[in-house]
Image (spheres, grey):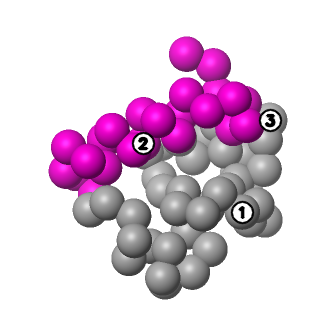
Amino acid sequence: MTMAKCFSCLISIPMGKPMEELLAEGMPVFCSHGCAMRFPNNGTAEFRLRFKELAEKKDFGVKK
């Protein structure tokens, strides 16, 4: 289980769920409005690619 991180800048954020659950649910988490605005629009090809990249990062502890 890993702590949730901002999907844009990757800083740790205290959340009620671990990062693995947030990724499995397809729920992006942001530390600020600015980070949310920089992240690709939900549902677009760019968003899906970024989400896949985040899920594959070792620092999120998510296994394929």
Pointer 1 or 2: first along the chain: 1
Q: Which quarter shows the C terminus?
A: top right
The residue closer to the viewer here, 34 or 30, is 34
Look at 53% across and 40% down and name the residue there. Answer: 54
Nearest the eye: 2 or 21: 2
Q: Amino acid at mark 3?
A: Met
Residue 61: quarter of image: top right
Q: Where is mark 2, residue-wise?
A: 51
Can residue 29 be seen here? The reply is no
**Residue 63 seen in the current view:** yes
Q: Which residue is mark 3?
A: 1
Q: Position of residue 42 (x, y in %)?
A: 28, 57
Q: Earlier in the sequence, mark 2 or mark 3?
A: 3
Q: Which residue is mark 1?
A: 11
What's the CA distance linking mark 1 and mark 2?
A: 16 Å
Q: Identify the amino acid type marked 1.
A: Ile
Foreground tag (1 vs 3): 1
